[in-house]
Image: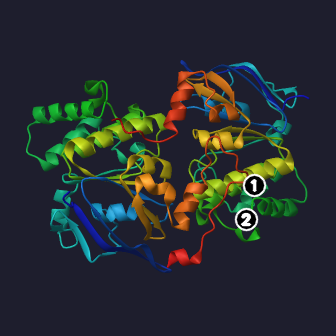
Amino acid sequence: MTPALAIDKLRVVYDDFIALKDVSLTVAQGESFGLVGESGSGKSTLLRAVAGLAPVTSGTIDVGGKRLGKTREKEFYRQVQMVFQDPYGSLHPRQTVDRLLLEPLDIHGFADTEKRIQRALDEVGLGSGFRFRYSHQLSGGQRQRVAIARALILEPSVLLLDEPTSALDASVQAEVLNLLEQIRRNRKLTFVMVSHDLGVITHMCERLMVMQTGEEVERLEAGDLASRKVTKDYTRNLLVASEGFVREP
Amino acid sequence: MSTLLHVEDLRVSFPTRTGVVEAVRGVSFALGQERLGIVGESGSGKSQTGRAIMGLTPLQAEIKARRLEFNGIDLLKASAAERRALRGNRIAMILQDPKYSLDPVMTIGRQIVETLRTHEKVGKSEARARALDMLAAVQIRDPKRVYDLYPHEVSGGMGQRAMIAMMLIAGPELLIADEPTSALDVTVQLDILRILDRLVIDRGMGLIFISHDLRLVSTFCDRVIVMYAGKIVEELKASELSQAKHPYTQGLLNCMPKIGENRHPLPVLDRQPEWLL
């Protein structure tokens, strides 16, 4: 089966700074793949390069078996969607939810927009009562649901999730994670998810890559983290840190 | 253990167009030389509790309390000038995001010196020397270089250390840390906590640690207060957090995904209306 996403020796350079150093990665269809690491490790850059938001200096990206060229086709921008970290910054403050959801449909020439908006809102558990609200009238969790609805409305095959719950409270995080899992199951979506929270990544993803300073540190199965089957010190430190504070005697 | 701070029946309310919003509804606790954690979701009133103690509540808000006393000083009766003399000197506060809470057009060194010279009569060269010492004390490797840098030139972890240095230079007896590590990476988080921990132990400072991160609070603090909708729903020893009685605390603990667990879907909080009472 052709992988949903295949990245080969991807490199992103800003002036003299190498943000991503020749990272390769294959994600099968319907798989959920996690990226972890500290800030500056290049995990978000990787997502952004795939989405077309960061400049690809060298290397190749294949989506659904199709190589991406210099200029990407419109179809690509329908197929691959992204959900960002900050639900306060990623929604247009002067557009209603309805307008926010209509825009991608308009761009891609979808018919029956009315029904699609209705359905997208239902799918993320918001209902039509939220349709004509502005984003400042919503809570953080509701905004993130709108962002997810906006990504889903184009019926993508790959969803890129950049720390989708790190700005949310633990209780709201659980709700959003459950929603994402349910959507993935129903629509057979492929996820690539970035998070600094190892708990979230092992909950959501089958495989993951640990990154540091723009490079791959190691690649693991979610179960390996639980059974502490890690080989690199860096990953071990992350694991220790995720357990909380330890007072030195 | 002497008690630094008494809070009894603290209430903070905000008048709005649609009526009065009560952010804090009758919070009581006492603090000694210890690490007290306050946890809760956004909107639970934990930050407003900290701000009321610090004296940073917006003017239009109303603060009421049976008792709000810091080392024998009645904070409710204190004049603005008296509050100002306390603030930054004997009571200090670390805020969440160094990117927004440091002055962007002042070097880090100058900001620290400003705090020091506001509260103590010290000469310029002595102030500089003390600021450099303080930067070294929060484990900044090259204090001389960082002293002359602007906040945008340093990383988040470094900025947070600079803010801690600024807050500690006057030697406060009470430190309120409002989500001091939420904007930082996990590994940097622990470095910052280690610094705070040492300060509590070495200086006998009282620390109020406000956070939504139960895992961090339970491993770092001595005692934890859990807030929901402006009220304390439970108070317990941090080490006994896992045996929490209140369904809200249990729910919060339960809904976090943990490594090595397989719970699909995650349990979510089932909010009961009686928790609001």
Q: Residue at x 79, y 63 (%)?
A: A122
Q: From the viewer's perspective, is A222 left or right of A63? A: left
> Where B29 falls versus A179 (above or below)?
below
Question: Contact (CB < 8 A) between labels 2 and 1?
Answer: yes
Q: Quadrant of the N terminus of chain A?
A: top right
Q: Label 2 sits on what residue type?
A: Leu
Residue B200: horizontal and vertical position, in percent?
26, 45
Dot 2: chain letter: A
Which numbered disc, 2 or 1, marks the residue that appears first in the sequence?
Answer: 2
Examine the rendering and report whether any part of residue B156 can be seen. Answer: no
Give the image quarter of residue A213.
top right
Q: Label 1 sits on what residue type?
A: Ala
Callout 2: few (<14), some (14-19), or many (20+) C-alpha neighbours within 10 Å?
some
Q: Residue at x 50, y 58 (%)?
A: B243
Q: How many numbered discs?
A: 2
Q: Residue at x 52, y 62 (%)?
A: B249
Camera-side residue of A19 and B34 = B34
Residue B120: horizontal and vertical position, in percent?
11, 47
Residue B253: horizontal and vertical position, in percent?
55, 55
Q: Quadrant of the C terminus of chain A?
A: top left
Dot 1: chain letter: A
What residue sits right under mark 1 in the picture?
A149
What residue sits right under mark 2 in the picture?
A126
